[in-house]
Structures are given as structure tokens and as C-alpha cells.
């Protein structure tokens, strides 16, 4: 292996090939501390040519590559296995914004750009880059594309896939595919771009992208409302969709149990709505017309919702800092869960018409089989996307509870998801966490097609093996 490490050093410069255990450590454990692996080396390339060179060296030696961005993913996709034979290819040094094309409303950037930096660079030129999620201060656009990340703006702007026009990808053979066209129409056969998006580093390494930009809204209004149950919350969503149409940019649901966990670990994040309502909904409207227009619209729809008995209470944020506080409360649920200890995550989508049935049935099954557990159910209700997470009963040791029950709880929830025609991964991806779940629930034909694609594009199985599908 020494000669391969020497070749890496010759390609990148010695300081960008990390082999010391202390230097490698920060790259070996995921954000949740759910997975820790070992790596032969962590490589930090600066250019697409360097990535190509490294992949060719790895292919020649049959060494597997784990692509990595901010390492914030929830499914262990960016964590190597325990063999110590895989290399981590972390793209953080590839962080140049190459161009903002004002007329075409696009931004061209390298895979290691941090999401928040992209949002800020776009805003500085009066554009909105709408992808927004809790990890935006550290996740990278390459990782967002590789996981097809969702977040809080999907109901208006779509997920990362919908925001992408072009890609540059290094293949498993080390070739560079230049698909960096900023076109909104391109019907030239198979869509290679969409094949790589969401492939979690198993089909190619994304090195750059052309992404869509949008006009920056001139006014946003945020409100927190209390609802009594899922049925009325969905009716409320439908009302906003009808009255506010494309001005509706956020519709996030939080159960009382989720916000109780927030309050326990972050008392300053307590729900400002009184009386601990069963459900709290954060709604955001964004407008390009006038502040007056959007505020009036919001008040009118809320009045209609009160009259129709869809909501029991509402607070409209009176300024930007209160609006930010509402969003902070929403984003802190994940952090509160992490403070509480290991939990079991289910990132699922259900058609809105079956969501109520899913929650009622699944809650009952979980509570009957696992008395005392907390169901931390929150998420992007506007997309039918629940984060249906299970925290062990208070006082029990999370690790031993999860060890004993993880498999059975995942299976119970996934069986319910399948029954309700949903998906076992809405936005977080598959990685290693849902490898078995995907095999069991994707459907045999779809799963075989995925394996066929993997074999065709990466016959040596060197790109992130045993993530998403095993061949
Ligand atoms: P990593 O974790 O480094 O990698 C993720 C996967 O992509 C791995 O399989 C890796 O091998 C692959 N990969 C990374 N870079 C490349 C590349 N350049 N080419 C090919 N493959 C690559 N996710 C959501 O969808 N919605 C949310 O609302 C959301 N909220 C979050 C909140 C918090 C607090 C945290 C910690 C995470 C959240 N996530 C969310 C999950 C995570 O942030 C996203 O999945 C994000 O897109 C991962 O980006 P990353 O750069 O950290 O990728
Ligand atoms: C969110 O929507 C993220 O906040 C995290 O997707 C979800 O913690 C989770 O399970
Ligand atoms: Zn989410």
C-alpha cells in the first residue's frame, strides 16, 4: 500500500493525504455518531483533474472510495467500513463558486461549496438559492446533490434534483463527464444528470454543478398555529395551497411530544403558543409584490381557518427576529433528539390522503409493543414528509434499547409505510442505514434495475460499495 499512498501524495501533495490516526479521526464518524469506520487515508483534492487521477489510481489497485462532503448525512453513506482498506475522498477544498449568470439565473459551483455560503453569495446578487436545511452551515452542495436533499422549501421550489441543471462527474473509471450546461430543456436521450443525483456516491463523484437561482422575495411572513389533529392540519394546508398558491413556501408540523423534547434541552426554545397544543404548525408565505399584500393575505387565510375550526390559536411573527426564533424552534428538534441520546429515525413520505391513517395506526402499534417510548413526529407536512422518530422510554439506556429493538421497530414502521403506499426514504437517502430496508421495500424489479445500473457504471464496485445497493 505504501506505493499507492506515495502515488496519492505525488498527485495531491503530501499534506493533502492524511494517514495519521489523529488527522483522519474527524472524517471517520458521522454527525449522529451512529457510524465510525476506518480508512487507509483521507484524500483532499483541489481540482476535478486531481479527483480523476485519484480514481484512476484506486481503480488500478482495486481500492474502494467513499466520497464525502460535510459528513452531515443521516444514513452513514459518507462513513467508510471497518476494514481500513477504503479511502475517503473529501471534497471540501473544491469550494469555488465559478460563476453567477444573471441572465440565465444560474450559479455554477464546485462540489465542496457549503450550502450557506451559496445562499449568501446568491443573496448578495439579489437572488434566492432556495435549498435550506438545518445542516446548511456545514453540508456541501456535492453532498446535497448526492443525497437529493430536501429541507424546508421543497413544497415551493422542489428538492435538490429540481434545482439542478448541470453536473460534472468523475466516473468509476476516472473519466470526467462534462454535463455542465445550464439548460432548462435538454431531451438528448437518457438523463445522466438525474442518474447521478441521489446516487449517494455509488455511481460517480460529483465535482461541480450548475444550479437554478430565483428572484429574492421582498417580504416573508411567518406564523405559528395550533391545530388539534392531522386531519384539520391537512385541511389547513389545502386551504393555504388554494388561497396563497405559490406564495406558500413553508408548512412544517411539530407534535407536542417533539416540542417537549426541545423545551427539555433548550428551554429558550419553548413553544410560544400557550397550552402545549397537540400539533404546532409553522407556516411561511413569501411575496414579490409588497409586504402589505402578503400580510393581508396571511391574516385573511388565518381568519378563514379560525372560522372553519381548523386552528385554535395563531401567532404571527412581528419582526424578522421573531420569525427566525420560530424557525430555530423547528430546527432544534433534531438537536434536542441528539442531546437526549441515540434515537431511531424514519424519514418517510406518505400520500397526504393516507397520512392520518398512517399516524393513527402506527402510533397505536408502536405504543402497544413498546410502552413508554416517545414518538418524535415532525417534519415537512407540506410534502407529506414525516420524521417519525422513536426515542426510548425515559430513563432507559438508549443504546441497549436500540440494540434490542431497532430492527423490529424499523420493520414495523416500514411495513406500515408500504401499506400506505409511501416511501421509506423521503429526503435523507439510503446509505448503509437503509440497505436492508431498500432491498425489502423497493420492489424486486426496481431493486434489480438499480443493481444492473450499478454493475454497468461501476463494474469493479469501487465507488462507495455496500451503500444503497449491494452487488
Ligand atoms: P455527506 O454526509 O458528506 O455525504 C452524504 C452522501 O453523499 C454519502 O453517501 C457520500 O458518499 C455522498 N457524497 C458526498 N459528496 C459527494 C460528491 N461530491 N459526489 C458523490 N457523492 C457524494 N437532509 C435533508 O434532506 N433535509 C433536511 O431537512 C435535513 N436536515 C438536517 C439537519 C441536521 C441538523 C443535520 C445534521 C442533517 C440534516 N439533513 C437533512 C441531512 C444532511 O444534511 C443532508 O443529507 C445533506 O445533503 C448531506 O450533505 P453532506 O455534504 O454533509 O454529505
Ligand atoms: C429536519 O427536517 C431534518 O429537521 C432532520 O431532516 C430530521 O432529525 C430528523 O430526523
Ligand atoms: Zn427533514
Image: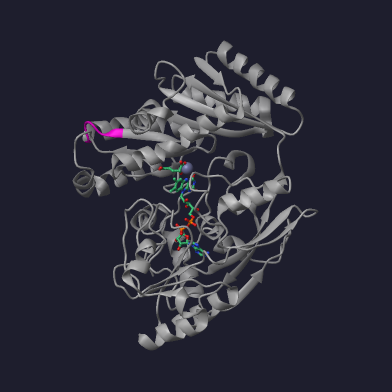
Q: Is residue 419 left or right of residue 192?
A: left
**Does the magenta run of residues contain 71?**
no
In this rendered view, identify the residue nearer to me: 460 or 164.
164
Looking at the image, can residue 104 be seen? yes
Residue at the spot 35% in from the left edge and 28% down from the top edge: 260
Depicted 172 relative to depicted 183: above or below: below
Instruction: Please identify the residue farthest to the right as the structure is shown.
Output: 103
Residue at the spot 46% in from the left edge and 82% down from the top edge: 9
Residue at the spot 43% in from the left edge and 37% down from the top edge: 332
The image position of residue 303, as x and y in percent, is 61, 14
The image position of residue 126, as x and y in percent, is 73, 45
Q: Is residue 54 left or right of residue 186?
A: left
In this rendered view, identify the residue nearer to me: 251 or 124.
124
Q: Quadrant of the C terminus?
A: bottom left
Q: Is residue 310 left or right of residue 441?
A: right
For residue 109, what is the image quadrant? bottom right
The image position of residue 25, as x and y in percent, is 34, 64
For residue 1, what is the image quadrant? bottom left
Main SS, magenta region, reads loop
Q: Which residues are magenta?
A: 370-374
Amino acid at each position: 500500500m505504501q506505493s499507492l499512498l506515495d502515488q496519492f501524495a505525488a498527485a495531491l501533495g503530501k499534506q493533502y493525504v492524511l494517514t495519521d490516526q489523529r488527522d483522519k479521526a474527524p472524517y471517520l464518524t458521522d454527525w449522529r455518531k451512529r457510524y465510525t469506520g476506518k480508512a487507509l487515508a483521507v484524500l483532499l483534492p483541489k481540482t476535478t483533474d486531481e479527483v480523476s487521477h485519484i480514481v484512476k489510481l484506486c481503480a488500478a489497485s482495486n481500492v474502494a472510495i467513499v466520497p464525502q462532503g460535510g459528513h452531515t448525512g443521516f444514513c452513514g453513506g459518507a462513513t467508510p467500513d471497518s476494514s481500513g482498506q477504503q479511502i475517503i475522498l473529501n471534497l471540501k477544498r473544491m469550494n469555488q463558486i465559478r460563476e453567477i449568470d444573471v441572465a440565465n439565473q444560474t450559479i455554477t459551483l464546485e462540489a465542496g461549496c457549503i450550502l450557506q455560503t451559496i445562499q449568501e453569495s446568491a443573496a448578495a446578487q439579489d437572488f434566492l438559492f432556495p435549498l435550506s436545511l438545518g445542516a446548511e452551515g456545514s453540508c456541501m452542495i456535492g453532498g446535497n446533490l448526492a443525497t437529493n436533499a430536501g429541507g424546508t422549501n421543497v413544497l415551493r421550489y422542489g428538492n435538490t434534483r429540481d434545482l439542478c441543471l448541470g453536473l460534472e462527474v468523475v466516473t468509476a473509471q476516472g473519466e470526467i463527464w462534462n454535463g455542465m450546461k445550464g439548460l432548462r430543456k435538454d431531451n438528448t436521450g437518457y438523463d445522466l444528470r438525474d442518474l447521478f443525483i441521489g446516487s449517494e456516491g455509488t455511481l460517480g463523484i460529483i465535482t461541480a454543478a450548475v444550479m437554478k437561482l430565483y428572484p429574492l422575495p421582498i417580504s416573508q411572513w411567518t406564523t405559528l398555529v395550533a391545530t388539534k389533529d392531522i386531519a384539520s392540519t391537512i385541511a389547513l394546508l389545502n386551504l393555504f395551497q388554494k388561497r396563497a398558491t405559490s406564495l406558500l413556501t413553508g408548512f412544517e408540523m411539530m407534535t407536542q411530544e417533539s416540542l417537549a423534547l426541545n423545551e427539555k434541552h433548550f428551554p429558550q426554545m419553548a413553544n410560544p403558543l400557550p397550552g402545549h397544543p397537540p400539533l404546532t404548525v409553522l407556516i411561511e408565505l413569501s411575496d414579490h409584490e409588497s409586504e402589505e399584500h402578503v400580510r393581508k393575505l396571511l391574516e385573511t387565510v388565518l381568519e378563514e381557518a379560525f372560522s372553519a375550526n381548523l386552528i385554535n390559536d395563531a401567532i404571527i411573527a412581528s419582526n424578522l427576529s421573531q420569525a427566525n426564533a420560530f424557525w430555530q424552534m423547528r430546527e432544534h428538534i433534531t438537536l434536542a433528539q441528539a442531546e437526549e441520546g441515540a434515537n431511531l429515525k424514519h424519514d418517510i413520505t406518505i400520500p397526504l390522503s393516507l397520512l392520518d391513517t398512517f399516524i393513527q395506526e402506527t402510533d397505536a402499534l408502536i405504543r402497544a409493543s413498546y410502552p413508554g417510548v416517545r414518538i418524535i413526529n415532525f417534519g415537512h407536512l407540506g410534502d407529506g414528509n414525516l420524521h417519525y422518530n422513536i426515542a426510548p422510554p425515559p430513563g432507559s439506556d438508549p443504546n441497549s434499547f436500540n440494540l434490542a429493538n431497532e430492527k423490529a421497530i424499523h420493520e414495523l414502521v416500514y411495513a406500515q409505510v408500504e401499506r400506505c403506499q409511501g416511501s421509506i426514504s423521503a429526503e435523507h437517502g439510503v446509505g448503509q442505514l437503509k440497505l436492508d430496508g431498500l432491498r425489502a421495500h423497493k420492489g424486486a424489479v426496481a431493486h434489480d434495475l438499480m443493481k444492473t445500473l450499478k454493475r454497468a457504471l461501476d463494474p469493479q464496485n469501487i465507488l462507495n460499495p455496500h451503500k444503497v445497493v449491494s452487488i
